[in-house]
Amino acid sequence: MALIMKYIDSLHHYLDKYGDPRTKDWPLMSSPFHTLGICLGYVYIVKVLGPRLMENRKPFQLKNTLVAYNLFQVLFSTWLFYECLRGGWWGEYNFRCQPVDHSTTGSAMRMCHACWWYYFSKFTEFFDTLFFVLRKKTSQVSTLHVIHHGVMPMSVWFGVKFTPGGHSTFFGLLNTFVHIIMYTYYLLTAMGPQYQKYLWWKKYLTSLQMVQFILIMVHAFQLLFVDCNYPKIFVWWIGAHAIMFFFLFKEFYRQSYNYRKLRSGKTQSNGYSNGSITSKKHDGDKLTNGHCNGVSKTEETTEQKHQNGTANGCSVSDYYVKSEDITTNMSLTQRKVTAEQ
């Protein structure tokens, strides 16, 4: 135990010596272990404790809560995007090379504060997963989803601790812009089926996420070939994250696309989806409402749509679906089509 405490003291000494003094005494910034503990607690709650507590309970109906939450995220992301622009990206920042301004001047401190609030926003996004658990949408608590939300707070903490400003804030600028669009989509879906006609652009959300990571990767790795007073370790750190998330999203997009192709034709007209039997609906015999639970559905007279990520028989437009489920369901659907032929 004494040896462990020695290493912890050495780590804190290193953080105090090389960390940005402006954020030293800010909430949760004195040590990485607070953030690490919160992230591990998040994973345990959404993967173990939450599903166990909800196992014998009915799912919560959270329509008004989801509307309020998504509206908050749209406004919060919009404000963060504006602060990143005013903190530097609206004029004085350089896309090719932007060192960190460690001074206490107006724009430098504005960006510094924006970085901390961006870090804080990663914790508020935990509610995405908590709402899935409370609504018993456990198939949407995917590996990709949990990795994305569980890793980000820890990653951003290091940025705020050592480089709260400069080149790496391009990541936050793009990410908050994408979140404005993403949470607007979730807000409209949570408000009810009458708003579905405004969601023609839902299929582009995953593509937008992938383009985001490509731009972040290019922006970060260019410093490997440019003489710039910016820590190379953060170039690799940000670039590696962009690569990892790009390929995770790419794999989801590929499997989701293949699954949609298999579901077309006979599987859409006869009411079979994801290994469950669903009676035809009166509104164009559509299969909707994300049939991911393998149970029979009764006849419905109105077209029920998705909320916060479930859409049209789990052909969702974002990453909140377990890719393993897509693969399994593709196999089930293929066997059904083969049997009928």
Image: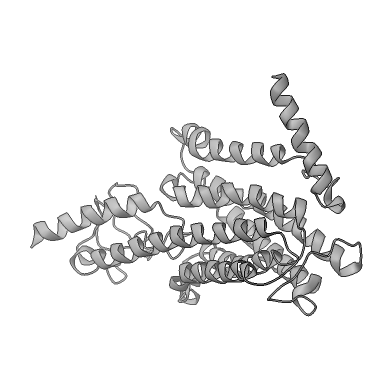
Q: Nearer the viewer, residue 128 or 147?
A: 147
Q: Is residue 305 visible?
A: no
Visual colour scheme:
one colour
Q: Nearer the viewer, residue 190 or 72?
A: 72
- Residue furthest to the right: 105
- Residue drawn at the location 48% of the way across and 62% of the way down: 246
- Report the side of 245 relative to 39 (left or right): left
Residue at position x 62%, y 67% in the image = 224
Which x, y percent locates residue 288?
A: 35, 62
Hey, which quadrant is residue 272 in on the image? bottom left
Locate residue 78 relative to residue 105 in the image: left or right: left
Q: Answer with left or right where residue 327 lies relative to residue 320.
A: left
Which residue is at the far top?
1
Residue found 73% across the figure and 31% down from its top: 8
Q: Is residue 181 above or below residue 5?
A: below
Report x, y in % for residue 161.
Answer: 76, 50
